[in-house]
Image (cartoon, helix red, strand yellow):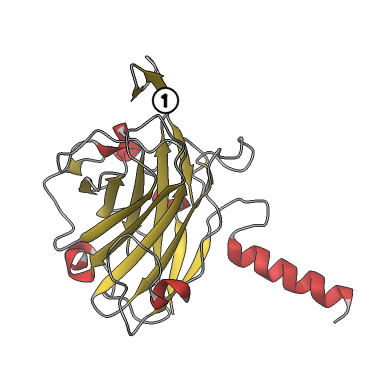
Amino acid sequence: MNSINIISIFSIVCVWLGGCDGAGPRRYSAHSVTGAPIIDGRLGDQAWMDAPWTADFIDIEGPAKPRPAFRTRAKMCWDDTHLYVAADMEEPHLWGILTDRDAIIYRDNDFEIFIDPDGDRLHYNEYEINVLGTEMDLRMDRPYRDGGNYDLRWDFAGVRSAVSVGGTINDPSDRDIGWTVEIAIPWSSMADTAGTACPPNPGDSWRINFSRVQWPLQIANGMYVKPEGATEDNWVWSPQDAIDMHRPEYWGFVRFE
């Protein structure tokens, strides 16, 4: 293969990935599976072994910002009944305090999913989970900057999730490895406002993004605490060009193969 062909192939790959400088929107091919993964927080199922990782998450504002301190990446696959999402997060200090469903989970370190099936920026869905397995989900009628409202009473009906940890939660006496999470989202929970085939047809693309919220921590009296006035880091799969996840036009393209 000559150098010109190598350059051409590299250029095509860069376009598909949303730019080799780390810029978005990112793209991902989610393959269908005949054997659904077991939702136990561990990623040893064949479905996950066959699924590629996304690119590592970067700062929400884009590649010009500092690289995240800890690695985050995700996988997706699907079948006739569910969208499956897995994430792997490096974390030396496993910490979480929120235990009530539909608490504002991003006040803890968390992993988040945003889904706009038809890409119209309307009636899109958000899901959050912390290391304790506490969940929050909601539906937006439109982005906040367009006067959007959220419905926290709405749920991904039938959603299943599990977390697996490499270390000990809320124990500053040791250094942890990280945590993994699996989520199974029923297509039926989104079908009413999807605006497109749900489940998708092979070849369809949806707008999806992932976020990881990460807070700085201090140790006081043998416990993790947030410093007063602390602000969080936001690490994402497809960069938003602003500290605002509610910009669906910047979300990644997930093609269902």
Compared to residue 229, the image places residue 195 above or below, namely below
Q: In the image, 43: left or right of 134?
A: right
Examine the image and state in which quarter residue 103 appears. Answer: top left
Q: In the image, 66: left or right of 78?
A: right
Compared to residue 200, the image places residue 112 above or below, namely above
Q: How many marks?
A: 1
Which amino acid is tagged 1?
Leu
Which residue is outermost to the front? 173
Within 10 Å of disc 1 (Cα), the crowding (few <14, some 14-19, many 20+) is some
Compared to residue 37, the image places residue 15 above or below, namely above
Across and down, in percent, residue 251 comes to 44, 54
Out of 146 and 182, give the one closest to the viewer.
Answer: 182
Examine the image and state in which quarter residue 188 appears. Answer: bottom left
Q: Residue 177: in sight, yes or no?
A: yes
Residue occupying the point 80% across, 73% down: 6
> In which quadrant of the rendered image does the C terminus lie?
bottom left
Q: Residue 204: in sight, yes or no?
A: no
Across and down, in percent, residue 95 comes to 34, 35
Which residue is outermost to the left? 153
Across and down, in percent, residue 66 comes to 61, 35
Which residue is outermost to the right? 2
Out of 117 and 65, give the one closest to the viewer.
Answer: 65
Residue occupying the point 68% across, 70% down: 12
> In which quadrant of the rendered image does the N terminus lie?
bottom right
Across and down, in percent, residue 225 comes to 34, 22
Residue occupying the point 53% across, 58% down: 26
Examine the image and state in which quarter residue 76 appears. Answer: bottom left
The residue tagged with tag 1: helix, strand or loop? loop
* Residue topped by disc 1: 217
